[in-house]
Amino acid sequence: MSNNTNTQFDALFYKVATNLFSLEYLEEVQSFYPKYLGKDDFDEIKFECENLISAIYFMNGMSDRSLEIDLDILKKHPIEDLRYRTVILRASKTSAELGKTEDVVPYAVRYLKDQENDFFGKLPLLAWYIEFYPNGEEGSFINFEQTLATIKSSMGATINPTLSFLDRVTFLYEEFLRANKDSSTFKFAYVKATKKQKDKLLEEYLRTETLAFFRTEIINTIKTSESINGD
């Protein structure tokens, strides 16, 4: 995609997002990409627009239309695309709501088995998978053991290895949700705190957070912020 087109689409996306994905922008997004037909970046622009159209439908409770678009995207685009996570997670939610998980599960399974390390996408999807397919593939979860091991390692989590596969997934997902919430709470408080309060908040957070990934993420975020602000 050309830099000029990137700028144009970014402006459109920003307008849609800051207006809470209102349906009033649907026609503008739909009419954005056809004018690039025949150009080298047409496929990329079309993907960006289709993804945004699906998001508009999703945010407005129109799950059937969102799922229809996402299934088409999942058929055509490779797992390696960084945006695949957004699409598959959105499709998992809408398919569950509509009782159409069987339409999404082949793409979910393929994504879960992929070697790419992406626990932010794979753990929620794995939790979705065991909810609707508690017997796994042909009564076994053996094909997902490596995925779960990679997720556990990436999170820096400690877990009882004697637990069942379902219990291990549930435990890790609950820990992920808890840590994500605590991280957001910490960041909000840290920004508003005085220097003395910040030191105390950070010490307490690092002492109590059990997941190594989130501790490291917080430290790196603070370092980056201090570097930019010259603190």
Image (tube, rainbow, N blue to C red):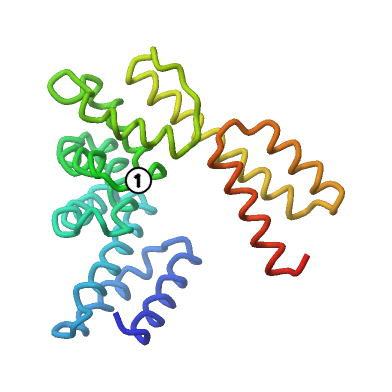
- Taking the image as shown, residue 182 lies to the left or right of residue 156, namely right
**Which percent across, then down, holds residue 153?**
43, 35
> Under tag 1, what secondary structure?
loop
Residue closest to the eye, 170 or 199 = 199
Residue closest to the eye, 42 or 112 = 112
Q: What residue type is labelled 1?
A: Asn
Total labels: the figure holds 1
Quarter containing the C terminus: bottom right
Residue 77 in the image: above or below residue 230: above
Q: Residue furthest top?
A: 162
Residue depicted at x 68% and y 31%: 208
Residue depicted at x 18% and y 85%: 39
- Taking the image as shown, residue 175 lies to the left or right of residue 223, namely left
**Which percent across, then down, holds residue 183?**
61, 43
Residue depicted at x 77% and y 54%: 192
Q: Name the residue under label 1.
A: 117
Residue depicted at x 74% and y 50%: 190
Residue closest to the eye, 87 or 231 = 231
**Which percent across, then down, holds residue 21?**
42, 62
**Which percent across, then down, holds residue 150?**
36, 36
Mark 1 Cα-neighbour bin, 10 Å: few <14, some 14–19, many ≥20: few
